[in-house]
Amino acid sequence: MHIVGRTKLPKSAEVAKLYLQCNDKAAIDYSAETPEVVFALQGLISTNSYFNSLYEKFYTRYTTLDKLFYLLNLEGNFQISVYREISIKSSEANCRQLLFQEKFFNCKIGKATEIELPELQQIQTERGRIYFELECLSQSGKLRESFLATPQLPEREVSVTIVACTFQKRLLLNEPSKLFYRINYYRANR
């Protein structure tokens, strides 16, 4: 499997709702080495958020991926539901479709739970945001991390682009070695 993206957890409680929606029986543990979600019985989280939803419009437009999976690193018993939410232009409401729902028992950290996503919608009016919800069925549970993955091989290597704002743009265009020297000098003297 090749990692396409990962579920992002917030670094502070002030911005948590941009990343995850939690009920009162689930919380993000910031004291762990890396943040993780801890659950009590019936704890529920949703990745229906700005940073953690999968936007079908983006993936169908800019990639050739046809098979996607969620890989969840869990501990405990969980019910996992995957939804597609479509925005309806004629009203303020959103239409939510259940794509997958299954119970997983005795999940262990280090052994990823795999959920295959349905094929992405090619019809523009049916594209939406895909996200998952986890409900804890055991007395306690954990979500350490989760990934969006594909079995497809990359078509090409990722390239890095440097974007320059107008600040010292002339220096970058005329004498790029001086600018990179300044960047490296700054890093070395921090």
Image (cartoon, rainbow, N blue to C red):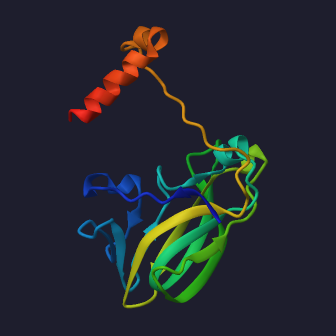
Residue 156 showing in the rendered view: yes
Work out which quarter of the rendered image holds the N terminus and state it: bottom right
Residue extending farthest to the right is 123
The image quadrant of residue 103 is bottom right
Residue 107, x across and y down, in percent = 50, 86
Residue 96 visible in the current orientation = no
Q: Nearer the viewer, residue 96 or 167?
A: 167
In this rendering, is residue 133 above or below 103? above
Vertical placement of residue 30 versus 39, above or below = above
Tell me the residue at 33%/77% (across/down).
25
Q: Is residue 133 above or below residue 182?
A: below
**Viewer-proximal residue among 181 and 134:** 181
Residue 131 lies, with reference to residue 109, above or below; the image says above
Query: What is the x, y in percent for residue 2?
Result: 63, 61
Q: Is 67 positioned to the left or the right of 177 in the image?
A: right
Image x and y of residue 180, in percent: 39, 23
Residue at position x 47%, y 51% in the image: 51
**How many numbered markers are drawn?**
0
Looking at the rendering, in which quadrant would you find the C terminus? top left
Which residue lies at the image location 42% right of the left edge and 74% below the top edge?
143
Locate residue 95, reporting x and y percent. Answer: 63, 57
Q: Residue at x 75, y 48 (%)?
A: 64
Q: Could you tell whether 152 is left or right of 77 in the image? A: right
State which quadrant residue 42 falls in: bottom left
Q: Residue furthest left?
A: 190
